[in-house]
Amino acid sequence: MHTGGIFAALSDTTPEVAADAIKTAKKHGVIVSYDLNYRESLWKAIGGKAKAQEVNRALVSQIDVLFGNEEDFSATLGIEMQGVSDDFDELPVEAYAQMLRDVAKAYPNLKIIATTLRTAHTATQNAWGAIMIYKDEIYHVPQKDIEIMDRVGGGDSFASGLIYGFLAGKDPEWALKAGVAHGALAMTTPGDTSTASLSEVERVMGGGSARIAR
């Protein structure tokens, strides 16, 4: 089961719906993943950042797999990343690794915590990678420059690619690379829904161009 912070922010009652769904899923042995996806505009009407932290802390304490970026972890969980500038023009890997360790320490229920690494050189040229902690070990896919057509949905496609890797019984490094490749491919097409095939994802994982073969 997958849900996240955008759903939880849609109304005063959606956090309760998410909590009930998570409880039911866990009762039946279903793995639950959650994307923090902090959106200030959504939380503004229902209590702002304080409410976002209250809701997300409660939900994250119940789930297995967590996705988010550096702003998400700070805004929704109150866990700051040290050693970076305000504009995130440099992304020191060790700072991200320490942030993931801090999240894992605060939420020992989490089995996987992952975040993308994005440096936007321009609107169309981004450096894209990811980092993950799994069983106390850090996995890292270094950033690589990609040409963006539409960046919407890149994070969701990263999450689904990583989830696929684990569900398919692949090793953690393969799963993280699949997430990065799938996210990159999603951003070469318009809209927020991926049209990439598994073979295209695997081609990018092997060093091919992050462009859909049309």
Image: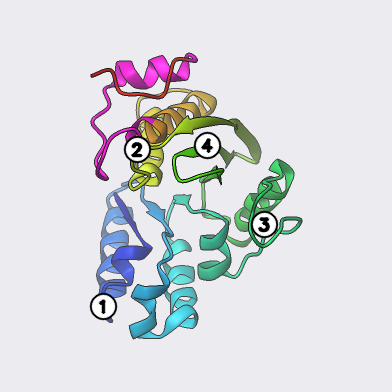
- Residue kind at label 3, given as amino acid type: Asp
According to the image, label 4 marks what residue? 128
Q: Is residue 161 left or right of residue 102?
A: left
- Residue kind at label 2, given as amino acid type: Met
Q: Nearer the viewer, mark 2 or mark 4?
A: 2
Q: What residue is drawn where x is 54% and y is 26%? A: 173
Q: Is residue 111 above or below residue 174?
A: below
Q: Which quadrant of the structure image shows residue 8? A: bottom left
Instruction: Give the CA separation, mark 1 to mark 4.
Output: 33 Å
- Residue kind at label 4, given as amino acid type: Trp
Label 2 packing within 10 angstroms: few (<14), some (14-19), many (20+): some
Instruction: Give the CA separation, mark 3 to mark 2.
Output: 34 Å
Q: What residue is drawn where x is 42% and y is 74%? A: 55
Instruction: Give the CA separation, mark 4 to mark 3.
Output: 23 Å
Find out whether the residues at labels 1 and 4 contact each other: C-beta distance under 8 Å: no
Q: Is residue 132 above or below residue 145?
A: below
- Residue kind at label 1, given as amino acid type: Ser
Mark 1 or mark 3: whose residue is earlier in sequence = 1
According to the image, label 2 marks what residue? 149
Q: Is residue 7 left or right of residue 39?
A: left
Q: The magenta stretch spans which residues?
A: 185-207
